[in-house]
Image (cartoon, rainbow, N blue to C red):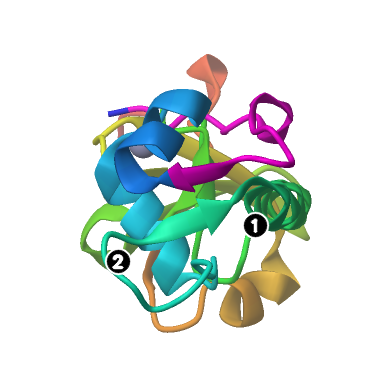
Amino acid sequence: MATRRANPQRVKLHRSYCVPELAACVGVHKGTIRNWQRDGLEPIDASRPAMFQGAIVRAFLAKRNASRKSPCPAGMIYCFACREPRPPALGMLDYLAVTTTSGDLRALCGDCGGIMHRRIRRADLAIKMPGLTVQFRQAPPRISGRPSPS
Ligand SMILES: [Zn+2]
Protein backbone atom coordinates (compact mmCIF):
# COMPACT_ATOMS: atom_id res chain seq x y z
CA MET A 1 0.00 0.00 0.00
CA ALA A 2 1.30 3.46 -0.82
CA THR A 3 2.55 5.50 2.09
CA ARG A 4 1.59 9.13 2.02
CA ARG A 5 3.82 11.77 3.45
CA ALA A 6 2.15 13.14 6.55
CA ASN A 7 1.64 16.88 6.53
CA PRO A 8 3.02 18.44 9.74
CA GLN A 9 0.95 21.60 9.19
CA ARG A 10 -2.21 19.72 10.07
CA VAL A 11 -1.00 19.19 13.62
CA LYS A 12 -1.99 21.98 16.00
CA LEU A 13 0.97 23.21 18.01
CA HIS A 14 -0.81 23.72 21.33
CA ARG A 15 -2.89 20.57 21.32
CA SER A 16 -2.18 17.15 22.73
CA TYR A 17 -3.15 14.07 20.77
CA CYS A 18 -3.72 10.46 21.69
CA VAL A 19 -2.70 7.87 19.08
CA PRO A 20 -6.10 7.60 17.28
CA GLU A 21 -6.53 11.39 17.24
CA LEU A 22 -3.07 11.95 15.86
CA ALA A 23 -3.52 9.24 13.22
CA ALA A 24 -6.79 10.83 12.09
CA CYS A 25 -5.28 14.31 12.13
CA VAL A 26 -2.36 13.57 9.83
CA GLY A 27 -4.16 10.88 7.83
CA VAL A 28 -2.08 7.83 8.65
CA HIS A 29 -2.77 4.44 10.21
CA LYS A 30 -2.48 4.05 13.98
CA GLY A 31 0.37 1.58 13.38
CA THR A 32 2.30 4.36 11.68
CA ILE A 33 2.25 6.38 14.90
CA ARG A 34 3.81 3.42 16.70
CA ASN A 35 6.50 3.29 13.99
CA TRP A 36 7.15 6.97 14.58
CA GLN A 37 7.57 6.27 18.30
CA ARG A 38 10.12 3.61 17.43
CA ASP A 39 11.83 6.18 15.20
CA GLY A 40 12.08 8.69 18.03
CA LEU A 41 8.74 10.48 18.42
CA GLU A 42 8.45 11.08 22.18
CA PRO A 43 5.14 10.97 24.02
CA ILE A 44 4.51 13.60 26.70
CA ASP A 45 5.18 11.09 29.46
CA ALA A 46 5.12 7.37 30.14
CA SER A 47 1.40 7.25 31.05
CA ARG A 48 -1.12 5.21 29.09
CA PRO A 49 -2.67 5.89 26.69
CA ALA A 50 0.28 7.73 25.18
CA MET A 51 -0.29 11.42 24.46
CA PHE A 52 1.72 13.52 22.05
CA GLN A 53 2.27 17.24 22.09
CA GLY A 54 1.47 18.92 18.79
CA ALA A 55 4.67 20.95 18.66
CA ILE A 56 6.80 17.85 19.18
CA VAL A 57 4.92 15.92 16.51
CA ARG A 58 5.39 18.77 14.06
CA ALA A 59 9.11 18.99 14.71
CA PHE A 60 9.43 15.23 14.36
CA LEU A 61 7.56 15.15 11.04
CA ALA A 62 9.40 18.13 9.60
CA LYS A 63 12.73 16.51 10.40
CA ARG A 64 11.57 13.17 9.03
CA ASN A 65 10.26 14.67 5.79
CA ALA A 66 13.51 16.59 5.31
CA SER A 67 15.62 13.50 5.80
CA ARG A 68 13.56 11.66 3.19
CA LYS A 69 14.68 14.15 0.58
CA SER A 70 18.21 12.84 0.92
CA PRO A 71 19.36 10.43 -1.78
CA CYS A 72 18.45 6.79 -1.56
CA PRO A 73 20.25 4.93 1.20
CA ALA A 74 22.66 2.18 0.19
CA GLY A 75 20.95 -0.99 -0.94
CA MET A 76 17.72 0.82 -1.82
CA ILE A 77 16.06 2.07 -4.97
CA TYR A 78 13.32 4.66 -4.98
CA CYS A 79 9.98 3.04 -5.78
CA PHE A 80 7.59 5.46 -7.44
CA ALA A 81 4.60 3.32 -6.51
CA CYS A 82 5.52 3.24 -2.81
CA ARG A 83 7.03 6.76 -2.93
CA GLU A 84 9.80 5.49 -0.69
CA PRO A 85 13.22 3.97 -1.15
CA ARG A 86 12.77 0.21 -1.05
CA PRO A 87 15.07 -2.78 -0.94
CA PRO A 88 15.00 -4.91 -4.11
CA ALA A 89 12.95 -8.10 -3.88
CA LEU A 90 15.16 -11.10 -2.98
CA GLY A 91 18.19 -8.80 -2.98
CA MET A 92 18.41 -9.13 -6.75
CA LEU A 93 19.24 -6.41 -9.25
CA ASP A 94 19.84 -6.17 -12.98
CA TYR A 95 22.46 -3.78 -14.27
CA LEU A 96 22.04 -2.64 -17.85
CA ALA A 97 25.09 -0.86 -19.17
CA VAL A 98 24.13 2.46 -20.76
CA THR A 99 27.65 3.75 -21.23
CA THR A 100 30.95 2.09 -20.37
CA THR A 101 30.92 3.73 -16.94
CA SER A 102 27.27 3.93 -15.96
CA GLY A 103 24.10 1.97 -16.27
CA ASP A 104 20.53 1.51 -15.23
CA LEU A 105 19.76 -0.64 -12.23
CA ARG A 106 16.46 -2.47 -12.35
CA ALA A 107 14.83 -4.41 -9.59
CA LEU A 108 11.45 -5.39 -8.32
CA CYS A 109 10.24 -3.52 -5.26
CA GLY A 110 10.47 -5.72 -2.19
CA ASP A 111 7.20 -4.22 -0.93
CA CYS A 112 4.83 -3.76 -3.87
CA GLY A 113 6.54 -5.79 -6.62
CA GLY A 114 6.65 -2.81 -9.00
CA ILE A 115 9.66 -2.19 -11.23
CA MET A 116 12.21 0.24 -9.83
CA HIS A 117 15.00 2.04 -11.70
CA ARG A 118 18.10 3.80 -10.55
CA ARG A 119 20.85 5.27 -12.66
CA ILE A 120 24.19 4.40 -11.17
CA ARG A 121 27.86 4.65 -11.97
CA ARG A 122 29.33 1.21 -12.39
CA ALA A 123 32.17 2.09 -10.03
CA ASP A 124 29.62 2.84 -7.28
CA LEU A 125 27.82 -0.49 -7.47
CA ALA A 126 29.72 -2.19 -4.65
CA ILE A 127 29.31 0.82 -2.34
CA LYS A 128 25.70 1.66 -3.11
CA MET A 129 24.36 -1.88 -3.44
CA PRO A 130 26.38 -3.81 -0.88
CA GLY A 131 25.59 -7.46 -0.45
CA LEU A 132 23.10 -7.56 -3.30
CA THR A 133 23.24 -9.91 -6.26
CA VAL A 134 23.79 -7.90 -9.43
CA GLN A 135 23.18 -9.52 -12.81
CA PHE A 136 25.06 -7.76 -15.58
CA ARG A 137 23.06 -7.57 -18.76
CA GLN A 138 24.08 -6.24 -22.11
CA ALA A 139 22.02 -3.61 -23.82
CA PRO A 140 19.81 -5.29 -26.42
CA PRO A 141 21.76 -5.89 -29.65
CA ARG A 142 20.93 -3.79 -32.66
CA ILE A 143 18.77 -5.40 -35.27
CA SER A 144 21.62 -5.30 -37.77
CA GLY A 145 23.85 -7.02 -35.24
CA ARG A 146 22.42 -10.51 -35.66
CA PRO A 147 25.06 -13.14 -35.81
CA SER A 148 25.65 -14.00 -39.45
CA PRO A 149 24.65 -17.55 -40.35
CA SER A 150 27.64 -19.64 -41.23
ZN1 LIG B 1 7.04 -0.34 -4.23
* Quarter of the image with the N terminus in it: top left
In this orientation, does residue 100 appear? no
Q: Main secondary structure of the magenta part?
A: loop
Residue at the image position 51 percent from the left and 55 percent from the top: 52
* Quarter of the image with the C terminus in it: top left
Residue 91 is marked as 2
Residue at the image position 30 percent from the left and 35 percent from the top: 29
Residue 72 is marked as 1
Q: Nearer the viewer, residue 82 or 141?
A: 82
> Where 115 falls versus 92 (above or below)?
above
> Where 101 falls versus 78 (above or below)?
below
Q: Residue 120 at what x, y percent from top left?
A: 69, 55
Q: Residue 63 at what x, y percent from top left?
A: 75, 57
> Where 138 falls versus 8 (above or below)?
below
- Residue bounds of the magenta highlight: 2-17
Write down the quadrant of residue 9 in the picture. Answer: top right
Q: Nearer the viewer, residue 105 or 49?
A: 49
Write down the quadrant of residue 24 in the picture. Answer: top left
- Mark 2 near ligand 1 (CB under 8 Å)? no
